[in-house]
Amino acid sequence: MVLYLGFLLVLGAWGVGNWSLLWRGLAIVAIYTVLDLALSKRREGKFIAPSSAWISGLILSLVLAPAAPWLAVLFAPVVASLGKHFIRYKQKHIFNPAASALVLLGFLFPSAAIVSWWGSAWGRIPLVVIVLSGIVTMFRVKRWKTALAFLVVYVVGASALLLSRGGSVADLRALFVDGTLFFFATVMLIEPVTTAYQPAWLRTAFGAGVAVLTLLFSLPGGRLPIPDPFLVSLLISNLGATSISMLIRR
């Protein structure tokens, strides 16, 4: 996963013609790594290999808008790492670290561009890479039902909404031929530690729930001032699925 996301970062910097995004991404990963090592040492009494920090740091790098202020760039890995280590239930974090940082920064910097999905949405090349890699990833981490439930519900719902508003087949193609949807579904949605919900059916319901919330937040005329429908829906569903799992396992 680290190599895959690192490749997307290099590919994205090349694709948009802005190599400073690569260096910015490496800085985010470095800050996240240092914090993760320090906090794991404090909590566990030993240093733990920060592979999850590299993954979350690279996700932040690929989703954080190129025009985001430098203060937001510095805060992003700090917020993600603190949330991962301190907002926990039974030895695992409740919220997706990268998503929680991006949403919080979106509220802290309401007038600034925070979320753009630039690393996955700049063309057909990342789309092909993300779809092919995503298929492998969702089976490797055993979350294909979660991703599939999300994609089916979202595609059917978004298609119905678009066509009901007079959209065309070309509009549908533009909506779904986009690396953002598949990057979210096969990377952020199925993060294995956050989504280790029990019983197993809850993971499938979680994927469908994220799709439903995303569609509700995207309804015409009813949009709330939130940083991003995908990310906010993910965090709400993280909390909901954790709560349901706690009730079931009592």
Image (tube, helix red, strand yellow):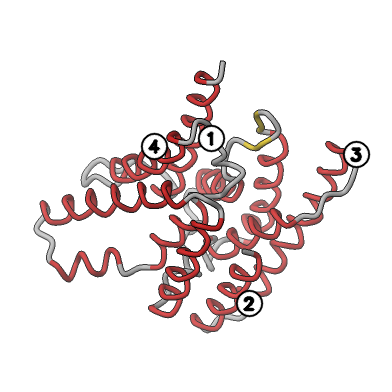
Helix, strand or loop at label 2? It is: helix
User: Looking at the image, is 16 positioned above or below residue 191?
Assistant: below
**Between disc 2 and disc 1, whose residue precedes?**
2
Tell me the quarter of the picture where residue 155 sits.
Answer: bottom left
Q: Where is residue 79 in the image (x, y as percent from the top left)?
A: 66, 45
Q: Answer few, some or many: residues within 10 Å of disc 2's Cα (few below 14, many 20 plus, some between 14 and 19).
A: few
Residue type at mark 3 is Gly
Q: Where is residue 46 in the image (x, y as percent from the top left)?
A: 90, 44
The residue pinned by badge 2 equals 20
The residue pinned by badge 3 equals 45
The residue pinned by badge 4 equals 205
Q: How many numbered circles are shown?
A: 4
**Between disc 3 and disc 2, whose residue precedes?**
2
Circle nearer the viewer, 4 or 2 = 4
Helix, strand or loop at label 4? It is: helix
Residue type at mark 4 is Ala
User: Which label sits on residue 197?
Assistant: 1
User: Looking at the image, is 42 positioned above or below residue 18?
Assistant: above
Q: Answer few, some or many: residues within 10 Å of disc 3's Cα (few below 14, many 20 plus, some between 14 and 19).
A: few
